[in-house]
């Protein structure tokens, strides 16, 4: 999947969804730094994408950077107050960040 999203980005480097999806695949494989870079680029291209903020929050959470995770989960919830995954992630990050 990573290769496919990389190819899609070569064809259209402004495709925010491709960055979000490649970031998700990288996070699944454990490459948190690349995932964060991809989610950050997705947010630059589409700053109203709650999923990109939530996903970057998860990457920060798994990296142990709870303050940044909390910030991203909070922003995701501002954009989509019904995002159950962002709510749960925020709760977990707040617990771990104490």
Image (cartoon, helix red, strand yellow):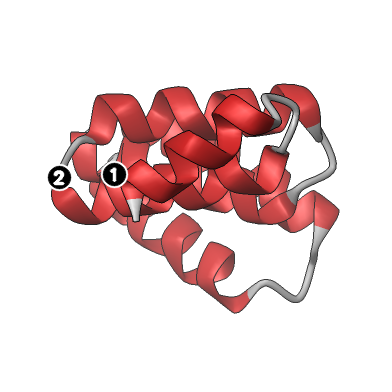
Label 1: element kind: helix
Q: Position of residue 97 (x, y in %)?
A: 29, 40
Q: Residue at x 81, y 33 (%)?
A: 47
Q: Position of residue 78 (x, y in %)?
A: 81, 51
Q: Position of residue 3 (x, y in %)?
A: 34, 43
Q: Are dots 1 and 2 in contact, CB under 8 Å?
A: no
Q: Residue at x 16, y 50 (%)?
A: 29
Establish if 82 lies above or below 23.
Answer: below
Q: Residue at x 50, y 52 (%)?
A: 21
Label 2: element kind: loop
Instruction: Using the image, tell me which numbered label, if any, was put on residue 26.
Output: 1
Q: Which residue is mark 2?
A: 30
Q: Position of residue 38 (x, y in %)?
A: 48, 30
- Does any portion of residue 73 appear in the rendered image? no
Out of 96 and 7, give the one closest to the viewer: 7
Establish if 89 lies above or below 15.
Answer: below
Image quarter hosting the C terminus = top left
Structural crowding at the residue carrying mark 2, measured as other residues with C-alpha within 10 Å and reported as few (<14), some (14–19) or many (≥20): some
């Amino acid at each position: 999947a990573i290769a496919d999203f990389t190819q899609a980005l070569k064809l259209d480097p402004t495709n925010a969804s491709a960055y979000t999806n490649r970031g998700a695949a990288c996070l699944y494989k454990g490459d948190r730094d690349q995932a964060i870079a991809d989610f950050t680029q997705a947010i630059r291209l589409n700053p109203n994408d709650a999923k990109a903020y939530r996903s970057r929050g998860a990457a920060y959470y798994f990296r142990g950077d709870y303050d940044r995770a909390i910030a991203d989960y909070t922003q995701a919830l501002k954009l989509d107050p019904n995002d159950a995954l962002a709510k749960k992630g925020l709760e977990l990050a707040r617990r771990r960040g104490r």
